[in-house]
Image: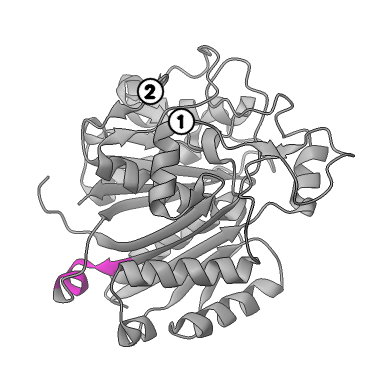
Amino acid sequence: MAERPGVRITGVHALSALGRGAEAQLAGVLAGTPAFRPVGRFDTTARRVGVAATLPETGALPDELAEAVDVACAAARLDAGARAGAPLLLAAHGGAGVPALAGELARRCGLAGAPRVYTSACVSASTAVADAAALIGRGDVDRVVVAAGYLVEPDQYALFDAGRALATDGAVRPFSAGRRGLLLGDGVAAVVLESAEAARRRDAPTLAAVLGWGRAGDAHHPCQPDPQGRGLARAVGAALRRAGLDPEQIGYVNANATGTGYSDAAEAAALRLAWGEHAGRVPVSSTKALHGHALEASGLLELVVTVLAVRHGKLPVNAGWLGPDEACPLDVIRDAPRPAATGYALSLNSAFGGANTALLVGAA
């Protein structure tokens, strides 16, 4: 693949119910076995649904985030001086306590002061990545550390259960007929992003490049997406324009698809709006069917999975598939991982309130 300008990804780490570490995420999504199990972390006997994708042994979220940042920085071969110049962008669920968490995490991991926090629901982490890429692209900083974390806990679990958003059959079935909803999952991840020049100066390992990004809102409804997918379509178009790529060059889409009726159909509509008939020829899957929905951390966990899969040359299956839905006429990856035809991929995320993001990456 020809060299293109872009922001380099030089270090990653992630955990989910698929396991701990980047290699565990890759192995898990390529195995294609969903990681949902009965929740043992708290009592669900009063809930309609009692399963989630949880990793059995996890520490407190601050500790897991610190480990993720340290491992990602070590993978990027950042010394103490390079860390000290890197700001932290943190995506996490919560309110007034998140800025304090971010400040403590930056101090604990030796990063620059004054971190930013992102609490914009399911586009939090992907928005942080887009902001990091913009900061680096403008030359404001050489590198940024983006971290994100959500561990399944009783409050959000109860809200999604009470809202009848959780799948009562214990499976997430993106784009499939018979889909019944989403399931929550653990997700903690950290990514080191650097300018191409800074990475070259350090002879840093490069896993991939963030070549484009897009953000757009549709403001259709507080919870339901625009059925025509106009906001997400604009985000996809913006990511392609920034990268200078055509739709025909994209070899994979890791979709936001949560397994819910309205949102999956709206996402399929967005891809058709953005790409026309070509939308039906691009391989698509949603890895949420394997590791669950990690809320604010979803965008970063899914970006890591997308980068690793494309770099490995195999695309994850869309688990839980029962049959086609005429509202989702896409090339959904079923049965077995598919070879990657190109090194370019999109990772898409959407959130309540009509927020949409698209991150476009190219394998190194």
Q: Is residue 119 left or right of residue 244?
A: right
Main secondary structure type of the part rendered in magenta: helix
Q: Between residue 82 and residue 21, name the one nearer to us.
A: 21
Q: Between residue 14 and residue 216, name the one nearer to us.
A: 14
Residue 269 on the magenta segment: no
State which quadrant residue 297 falls in. bottom right
Q: Residue at x 52, y 72 (%)?
A: 66
Vertical arrangement, residue 335 with respect to residue 234, above or below = above
What is the secondary structure assignment of the residue under circle 1?
loop
Q: Is residue 109 left or right of residue 277?
A: right
Q: Magenta stretch: give its range.
A: 193-200
**Residue 174: image location, x then y, percent:** 54, 27
Q: Residue at x 25, y 37 (%)?
A: 313
| Residue at mark 2 | 336
**Residue 33: image location, x then y, percent:** 51, 31
Residue 198 on the magenta segment: yes
Say whether marks 2 and 1 touch (CB < 8 Å): yes
Residue sitting at the far front? 57
Q: Residue at x 37, y 32 (%)?
A: 274
**Residue 40: image location, x then y, percent:** 75, 46
| Residue at mark 1 | 32
What is the secondary structure assignment of the residue under circle 2?
loop
Q: Is residue 14 left or right of residue 144?
A: right
Q: How many marks?
A: 2
- The answer to which of marks 2 and 1 sits earlier in the sequence is 1
Query: Looking at numbered disc 1 in the image, what kind of residue is underneath it?
Result: Gly
